[in-house]
Image (cartoon, rainbow, N blue to C red):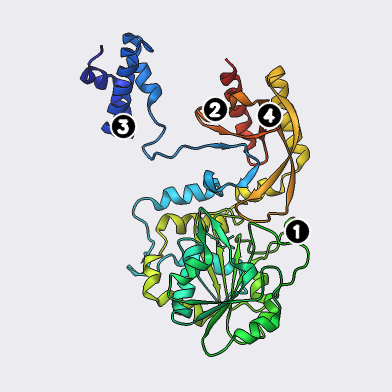
């Protein structure tokens, strides 16, 4: 059995300790020795075995090829950052001028350039603020504007956002009381008017971003609600800043403000295609009240988020926007090339991709990919990098809509490797 200190002294494993740290490399060495003991590797190959077991980074998270056809996949980290955003994160990772004016040598407003980029993107907003995520944005609004008061909200908009988290419970946890109005399927303006009074903190309008109610329905638009008196807070969910013709039912921040919302809340890592963040846009006085509230400090975003958000807003189109609008003919051509390369192992399939956790539950995006033996799913997930598809009709479908064209080669090599 090769000794641990001898293995760690190997120049390749010594180099790995520089990038990954001693603990991770020692862990890989121990696993490699175990493989030798079990007869799965020979003693002469112990160092190679340890090298193969090393993680790509010390960070724990693995980069994954998302071939599920779900563009905003919460389990896979929602929106992928653009290369410009990644570069901005890297630049901000060390010491950075996040709260410092380099010209004057003085303290400056935290994240001012990112906030300016958001304000520039939505001129309809008098002021903007950014917190950890949309749930934090709603908590802050409820705490600062409706603690010990009422939030008037339709029964059709009491949403569970996922993983058991429910907006009504989140709002009540701030000390605000919910004043539910209307019914699951129908709420009209009169319901709101009868509920609004001196106790009202604000009227909340929540976009049903992950479900649809069809049939005998009625709801009240923001412009009608804006006539009721109290401020209207609109949770638009997905983070579209402008309307997208492909997603006609998705509200956008600019539109909600034009219709009279006093405050709009949204996620940064859904359809905006940026980092996890909660965007708050709207009335200058309200935004200032939120910004100055003690809770704001607990929901503050870090410099990495600010950097990624600004690059998403100012830089080239984020990947998510490209995936959403890519031409299906292009995807089909890529699928055909892949299938030719893989021969009998793969077949071109027309698929339907989805926006996913990020919104637009009714939107079907025509897409293309390849179908392979479903028995390959486990081996593809253990590939480096892992390739995650979706099982449909007894086969594993690898949908190309959320895959960078440059990663088709990764998929081909992974399928070939999984077949051997
Ligand atoms: C996704 C979503 C949320 C939660 O947003 P996070 O950024 O995940 O906290 C809240 N409201 C709506 C309507 C959503 O779609």
Distance between the alpha carbons at the discs numbered 3 and 2: 25 Å
Q: Secondary structure at mark 3?
A: helix
Q: Taking the image as drawn, is residue 226 in sight?
A: yes
Ligand 1 contact, mark 1 (Cβ < 8 Å): no
Circle 1 residue: 245
Ligand 1 contact, mark 2 (Cβ < 8 Å): no
- Earlier in the chain: of badge 2 and badge 4, it is 2
Discs 2, 4 touching: Cβ within 8 Å: no
Distance between the alpha carbons at the discs numbered 4 and 3: 39 Å
Circle 4 residue: 394
Observer-side mark, 2 or 4, equals 4
Q: Position of residue 236 (x, y in %)?
A: 61, 66
Distance between the alpha carbons at the discs numbered 3 and 1: 48 Å
Distance between the alpha carbons at the discs numbered 4 and 1: 35 Å
Between 120 and 54, the residue placed more toward the observer is 54
Distance between the alpha carbons at the discs numbered 2 and 4: 14 Å
Mark 3 crowd level (few <14, some 14–19, many ≥20, 10 Å Cα) = some
- Earlier in the chain: of badge 3 and badge 1, it is 3
Circle 3 residue: 24
Q: Secondary structure at mark 1?
A: loop
Q: Residue at x 25, y 11 (%)?
A: 1
Circle 2 residue: 378
């Amino acid at each position: 059995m090769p000794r641990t200190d001898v293995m760690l002294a190997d120049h390749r494993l010594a180099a790995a300790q520089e990038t990954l740290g001693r603990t991770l490399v020692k862990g890989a060495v121990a696993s490699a020795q175990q493989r030798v003991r079990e007869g799965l590797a020979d003693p002469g190959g112990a160092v190679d075995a340890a090298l193969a077991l090393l993680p790509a980074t010390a960070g724990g998270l693995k980069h994954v090829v998302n071939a599920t056809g779900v563009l905003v996949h919460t389990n896979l980290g929602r929106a992928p950052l653009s290369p410009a955003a990644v570069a901005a994160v890297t630049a901000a990772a060390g010491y950075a001028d996040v709260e410092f004016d380099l010209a004057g040598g003085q303290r400056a407003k935290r994240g001012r350039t990112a906030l300016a980029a958001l304000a520039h993107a939505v001129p309809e907003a008098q002021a903007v603020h950014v917190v950890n995520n949309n749930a934090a944005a709603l908590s802050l609004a409820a705490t600062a504007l409706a603690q010990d008061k009422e939030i008037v909200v339709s029964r059709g908009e009491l949403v569970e956002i996922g993983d058991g988290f429910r907006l009504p419970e989140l709002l009540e946890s701030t000390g605000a009381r919910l004043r539910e109005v209307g019914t699951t399927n129908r709420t009209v303006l009169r319901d709101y008017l009868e509920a609004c009074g001196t106790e009202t903190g604000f009227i909340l309008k929540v976009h049903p971003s992950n479900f649809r109610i069809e049939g005998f329905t009625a709801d009240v638009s923001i412009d009608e609600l804006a006539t009721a008196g109290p401020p209207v807070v609109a949770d638009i969910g997905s983070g579209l800043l402008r309307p997208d013709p492909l997603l006609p039912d998705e509200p956008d921040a600019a539109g909600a403000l034009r219709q009279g919302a006093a405050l709009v809340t949204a996620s940064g890592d859904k359809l905006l295609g940026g980092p996890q963040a909660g965007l708050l846009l709207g009335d200058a006085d309200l935004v200032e009240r939120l910004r100055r509230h003690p809770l704001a400090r607990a929901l503050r975003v870090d410099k990495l988020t600010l950097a990624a958000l600004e690059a998403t807003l100012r830089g080239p189109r984020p990947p998510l926007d490209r995936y959403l609008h890519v031409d299906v003919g292009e995807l089909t051509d890529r699928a055909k090339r892949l299938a030719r390369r893989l021969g009998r192992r793969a077949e071109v399939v027309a698929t339907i991709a989805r926006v996913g956790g990020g919104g637009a539950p009714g939107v079907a995006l025509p897409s293309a990919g390849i179908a392979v033996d479903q028995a390959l799913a486990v081996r593809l997930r253990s590939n480096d990098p892992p390739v995650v598809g979706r099982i449909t009709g007894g086969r594993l479908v690898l949908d190309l809509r959320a895959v960078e064209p440059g990663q088709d080669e990764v998929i081909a090599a992974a399928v070939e490797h999984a077949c051997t």
